[in-house]
Amino acid sequence: AGLAAALPSQAADALQKAPYGTTADGKAVEQYTLKNAHGIVVKFISYGGILTDIDTPDRHGKLANIALGFGSLKDYEKYNGNIHFGALIGRYANRIAAGRFTLDGKTYQLPINNPPNTLHAGPNSFDAKLWSVQPVTVPNGVGAELTYVSPDGENGFPGTLTAHVRYILDDSDALHIQYSATTDRDTVINLTNHSYFNLAGQDAGSVEDQLIEIAASRYTPTDATSIPTGELAPVAGTPFDLRKPTPIGKGLRSSNPQMLWAHGYDHNFVLDNGGKGKPAFAARVSDPKSGRVLEVSTTQPGLQFYTANGLDGSVAGSTGKAYRQGDAFALEAEHFPDSPNQPKFPSTVLKPGQTLHEETVLHFAAH
């Protein structure tokens, strides 16, 4: 309350808050609304820091929600542990081989939830936690800071980790996702947001005709269980060459073993401009039909491009339509999968006295 009281009322007014139900174990969840000068609306909930809605205009100014999600907290609790719609992912996004890594000579075992590996830090992780939320004052925009303290040993990870994530929507039509974290013991960390997008609207069906461009000359090939081999392979001559705008559907039925193993795209791209102190261009997706464009810039070294291969028509979204494979894409800006076991990959170790800083910017437009 001290922080909120210290802020000018304008900031508190700009961030709207409403009840969003109660968790199965009786905790109240709130939904927060960010709105900018051009009518773009971003909503998130304190449960999992989940982005539930991103309403952006098409070329005619018509708003649609381009983020897949559920219509109730109950559905998020029931299904999102496997799907992760819109959620904050930590302590370690993506996969860790056999759920095991060694740090400072000690081996740590995480729960296996994507056999034989750990995916997105295991079950009941950051995506299922209640985050505390405070408004933040920003010029030409509206923002909120979410905080979660992960105790030492949670899901097998060492150290008490304090994570802060800021969602800032500004009047240049960009959503900034700013991550920071500190620890009291050496640990590994890889934070991301796992939003699924369909630029035609969250219930518009296939994204195969939407055009994707990823600024990456290399990617990290995997074994059959989606663990990187350690190679940084050139994208040239493969379905992973997305350096020019390419229909998402073009590579989806490729017989490339990488595509067959993952049932589509679920791969980490090594960003040409990644790992810099300031967000640099990573990817752009455009929808010829609606004119909507999403551009991603990030400080992170990698981008996991995922074509929602796990959606099989067994869950329905917020408007009651079933979601199927290829109905969305995710662009998870993050460090590489299995980095704790891959000494040649950029390090994901965080030590006491250090502060992790990463930022990903989603810029919305229409042409």
Image (cartoon, rainbow, N blue to C red):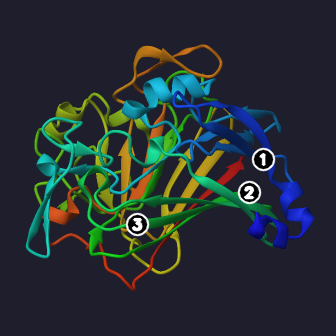
Q: Residue at x 29, y 43 (%)?
A: 122
Q: CA distance from mark 1 to mark 3?
A: 33 Å
| SS class, disc 3 | strand
Q: CA distance from mark 1 to mark 2?
A: 7 Å
| SS class, disc 2 | loop
Disc 2 + disc 3, Cβ < 8 Å? no
- Out of 284 and 288, give the one closest to the viewer: 284
- Out of 175 and 142, give the one closest to the viewer: 142
Q: Could you classify mark 3 by the number of other residues whose Cα lies within 10 Å: few (under 14), some (14-19), or many (20 or more)? A: many
Kindly tell me whether residue 245 is visible in this rendering: no
Q: Residue furthest front?
A: 26
Is residue 147 toward the left or the right of residue 244 in the image? Answer: right
Q: Amino acid at mark 3?
A: Leu
Disc 1 + disc 2, Cβ < 8 Å? yes
Q: Residue at x 28, y 69 (%)?
A: 187
Foreground label between 1 and 3: 3
Position in image of residue 89 (x %, y %): 42, 50
Kindly tell me whether residue 28 is visible in this rendering: yes
| SS class, disc 1 | loop
The answer to whether 206 is drawn above or below residue 247 in the figure is above
Residue tagged 3: 161
Residue tagged 2: 173
- Quarter of the image with the N terminus is bottom right
Q: Could you classify mark 2 by the number of other residues whose Cα lies within 10 Å: few (under 14), some (14-19), or many (20 or more)? A: many
Is residue 13 toward the left or the right of residue 356 in the image? Answer: right
* Earlier sequence position, callout 1 versus callout 3: 1
Position in image of residue 33 (x %, y %): 76, 46
Q: Amino acid at mark 1?
A: Ile
Q: Residue at x 38, y 60 (%)?
A: 151
Residue tagged 1: 40
